[in-house]
Image: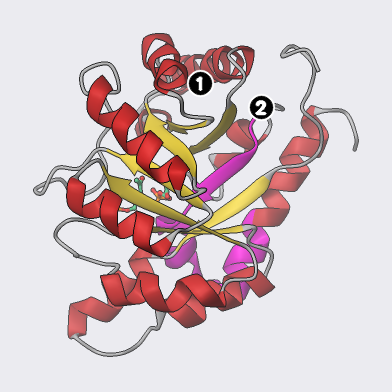
Amino acid sequence: MSFLQPAGPSIELGINIDHVATLRNARGTAYPDPIKAALEAEEAGADVITLHLREDRRHIRDADVKAIRPLLKTRMNLEAAVTREMIDFACAIRPQDVCLVPEKRTEVTTEGGLDVIGHFADVQAAIRQLQQEGVHVSLFIDPDPQQIKAAAEAGAPVIELHTGRYADATSQKEQQDELERIQGSVLEGVKLGLKVNAGHGLHYTNVQAIAAIPQIAELNIGHAVVAHAVFAGWRNAVSEMKAIMIKARLAAIGKV
Ligand SMILES: CC(=O)[C@@H](O)[C@H](O)COP(=O)(O)O
Ligand SMILES: NCC(=O)COP(=O)(O)O
């Protein structure tokens, strides 16, 4: 398949359950239960369950990951920082997918992509260690051609493009510029033989343009789905997001 050809109608939804745990942790209760959220999300159409074990354990905890791993019918995408502790933990859990992400203790959320160029040897070693356990490794990077090239050189088969700047754009022009940057980066990634995913800050009215990029394989979405669930219910929030993504993809490739 040429990288200029549409990848097709298929686009997968990874539901990030981090902020179900944020709500649970806020009151130290056992509810809402991230395990229940993961299993119900699968029933509502999620193709992947994404969860980020942060170094400060502010939302997902080790016990959540361990409990959820054997119960999933789909795939687990564990987001982890490039540290000895996290890579060893991920190797012990052996999720289907691990996405290596940057992390700062004081950030409110993941502010940007992993600097693969600046931490090349560590990233490459982490990829190799995880691949020895049969894990598909993804790198969460900015839509930047140099970082994409470095990701391919480091041996990652998958990249996830950070869509935060697109999501946070404060003008139409800025959003359009960011969208074009993402579109160009998707083609760069595909040209290098990478599977290209995307995510961060996507919600029910900004996801369409990203889902419409035909070569994107998977979107990971969390905060907006948890927020919408307050009003719509969890399963509805998941299935509405999936339906919006598929509609946008089919329209983009002329199938509707
Ligand atoms: C890496 C990433 O984008 C997700 O893990 C997302 O950031 C989840 O929310 P927090 O950033 O609040 O952990
Ligand atoms: N990797 C991005 C992700 O998992 C979801 O991010 P968000 O939708 O919670 O911003």
Real-space Cα separation, disc 1 to disc 2, in angstroms: 9 Å
Which percent across, then down, holds residue 204? 56, 50
- Residue at figure coordinates x 46%, y 14% from the top left: 177
- Residue at figure coordinates x 55%, y 77% from the top left: 71
Q: Is residue 77 magenta?
A: no
Is there any visible trace of residue 232 in the rendered image?
yes
Which percent across, then down, holds residue 158? 52, 32
- Residue at figure coordinates x 23%, y 56% from the top left: 54
Asked which secondary structure carries label 1, the reply is helix
Labels 1 and 2 touching (C-beta < 8 A): yes
Callout 2, which amino acid? Ile
Q: Residue furthest bottom?
A: 30
Q: Please report whichever mark, 1 or 2, sits nearer to the chain's N-terminal start.
A: 1
- The residue segment tinted magenta is 216-241
Asked which secondary structure carries label 2, the reply is loop
Lateral position of residue 99 relative to residue 88, left or right: right
Which numbered marker is on residue 182? 1
43 shown above or below 149: below
Classified by dominant secondary structure, the portion drawn in magenta counts as helix
Disc 2 designates what residue?
213
Callout 1, which amino acid? Ile
- Residue at figure coordinates x 35%, y 75% from the top left: 64
